[in-house]
Image: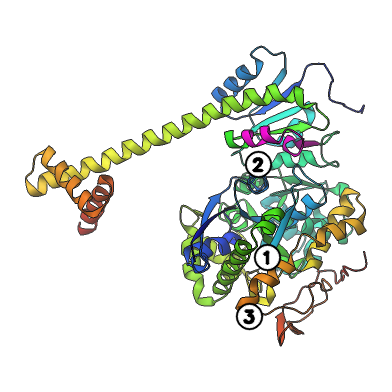
Amino acid sequence: MKTVTLSAAYIPLVDAAPLIVAQEMGFAEAEGLSLDLVKAPSWSSVRDMLAFGRVDAAHLLSPVPVAMALGLGGVTTRLAAVSVLSVNGDVIGVSNALADRLSAAGFSFDFADAKAAGEALCRVVDKPLRIGVPFPFSMHVELLTYWLGALGMPPDRMSVRTIPPPLMAQALADGEVDAFCVGEPWGSIAVEQGVGTLLLPGSAIWAFSPEKVLAVREDWAETEPHLTDRLVRALWQASHWLSRPDSLITTAEILSRRAYLDVPTEIIDRALEGRLVISARGDQRQVPHFLEFHAGLATFPWRSQAAWIADRMAARAGLNRGLAVQAGRAVFRSDLYRRALKPLGAEMPAASEKLEGAIREPMTQAAVEGAVQLLPDLFFDGRIFDPSAS
Amino acid sequence: MPDRSPPASGRLSIVVVEKDRDRAIQIVDALSAGNDYDIAVIGSETGLARQIAQRAPDIVLIDIDNPSRDTLEELTLASGPLERPVAMFVSGAAGGLAKQAIEAGVSAYVVDGLQPERLKPVLDAAIARFQMFRRMRTELAETRKALEERKVIDRAKGMLMKARGLGEEEAYALLRKAAMDQGKKVVEVAEALVTAARLLG
C-alpha cells in the first residue's frame, strides 16, 4: 500500500491524543497513512482550515459540524463527523472569590453532584454569572446551559463568554469571568496557577457526552471513501491502544512534547487517569470515566447524540427543532463509521440511535454480532432525550 | 435601537484587531491609502466581542493566528452582541478572495449584506499587508535558524580543533566529510558531536 499523507488540524488539548497517537505510535502508518498534524491557534482556525481545504481532517468540537449544518456561525460548509474522538473530559471551575463564598455557604466540593453544586451556585451568586467557554458552539456551552437551565437559572442571570483557553486562567484572575468550562489541561492549569477551584467534571452533568469528533468535509468523504475508511480505522486503533492502562505513561510523555501540548506530563496524567487536583491546596478527586477514548463504544458517532446537540442549539437560536434534529442527525456519519470498521470486526451496535440519558449502569446491548458494552449516559436531572420525539 | 443597515455609499467603518502597535499602524496606512474609511484599532483583547459590538463596524480584520479570533465567533450569532450578525465573508460570492485571505493570514468578518464590490478593495489591501508580515516572519525565522546552525557548527569546530589539534579549516573539512559520508547535513553532524560531548561530560 502506497503511503498517503493527510493533513489534520488539532488544538493542543489532552483529547487530541487519538490523532497524535495515531501518527506517533504507527496506527496511521499501518493503514498506509502519514498524518501531517497542524497545531491550530483557535477553533475558528481549525474549522476554516478544514472548510477551505487547507487540511483534510480535523479534531473538532462535536457541536461545530452540527452548527454548520444548521447554518449557525460564520461558515456553513458541510462537514461529516466520521467518528467520535473523545467522550467527556471538560471541567467546570470557579474563581477563588466564588469558591470562598461556596465554602462559606457550606458547600463541600465533592466534584460529583451537579445538582448540589448548581443549587449552591445559584444561592451564592447575587449578580449575573459570567462564565468563560472556549467557543460559542461547544459541548461546554451545551453542558452549562443544560445544567443551569434545568436548575431554573434564567438565561439573563448567566452570561456565557468566549475566551481562548490559554487566556482563561488570566481572565479568571482579572475578574473578567466568575467561572469557566474548559477541556484539559486548561482547568488544571488554572488550579496550578492558584486562580481557580474545580467544581465539577462535565461528566457530572451528562455522563457520556461526545466531546470531540473526527471531522472531514462531506464532499471529501464522498470522493475519497478509501482514505476516509483508512483514517477512521487508524483512529479506532489509536483509541483502542489509548484505553489500555499501560499506555498512560507513554501517552502523557508524547502529549507533553513541545511540538504538541508543551505541558508537564504530571498535568496531563490528571486527565488521563481521571484523578483531578481540584484546588490550590491539593485536594484530589477520582472521577470514573472522566475522559474516555474507547470504552463503552466511545468512538461510535450516535445519530442521537447529534440530534440532542441540534435540538438544544435550535431551541436557543429560535430555529425549528424538528428540522434541526433531522439536519443534525445527518452530520454524525455512523454509516461511514460502520463501513470503515467492518474489516476489523470491531463491535457495532445494532442501531445507530439510542435514547440519550437512559443507561443507568454499565450494560450489555444486542449488537450486529454478539453484544456490546455501553456505559452510563445519564443526565444529572434524570431526563431522557428521545431523538424520534422531536 | 434602529436597524443598522450597512451604508450603501457612506464611509465604511473598519475595526482592526491588532496588539502590536507597529503592525496596526502599517495596516491602517495600507487601508487608508487613497480611501476614506473610518478605521479603529483595538489593541486590548479583553471583552473583544463587546468592544467590537460597541463600534458596530462593517468589517473586522484580525490576524488568523490570533487565538482571540474565537471570541469574534459570538458576533455571528443572531442572539449575540451585534444587532446585525456578521459572517466570515467567505461563505458568499467572494470565495476566491477568501482563500487568498486565509493564505495571507488575515480573517475578515463582514456585516451581513455588505456589497462585495465595497469589500474587495479593503480585502485586497489587507491581504497585501498581511502577506508582507508573513514574509517578514518567515525571513526572520530563517535568519534565526541560520544563526543557530552557525553557532552549533562553530562549537563543533572548536571541539575538533582542541581534541585533534586541527586548524579551523581542517576541522570544518572533517565535519563536511563526515556529513557527506553519512548523507547528512553538516549541522546535523555538528549537533551530534556537541550532544555526544555533552553526554560524555
The CA distance from mark 2 to mark 1 is 38 Å
The picture places residue B173, in percent across and down from the top left corner, at 15, 43
Horizontal side, residue A256 vs residue A56: left or right: left
Residue A174, label in figure: 2
Q: Nearer the viewer, residue B158 or A201?
A: B158
Give the structural element (helix, strand or loop) at label 3. Answer: loop
Q: Which SS does the magenta portion mostly show?
A: helix
Give the structural element (helix, strand or loop) at label 1. Answer: strand
The CA distance from mark 3 to mark 2 is 52 Å
- Quick check: is A262 in the magenta stretch? no
The picture places residue A269, in percent across and down from the top left corner, at 53, 66
Q: Disc 2: which chain?
A: A
Q: Which residue is mark 1?
A: A83
- Residue furthest out toward the top: B34
Give the structural element (helix, strand or loop) at label 2. Answer: loop
Q: Which residue is mark 3?
A: A345
Task: Give the magenta-colored segment's residue range.
Answer: B86-101
The picture places residue A336, in percent across and down from the top left corner, at 70, 67
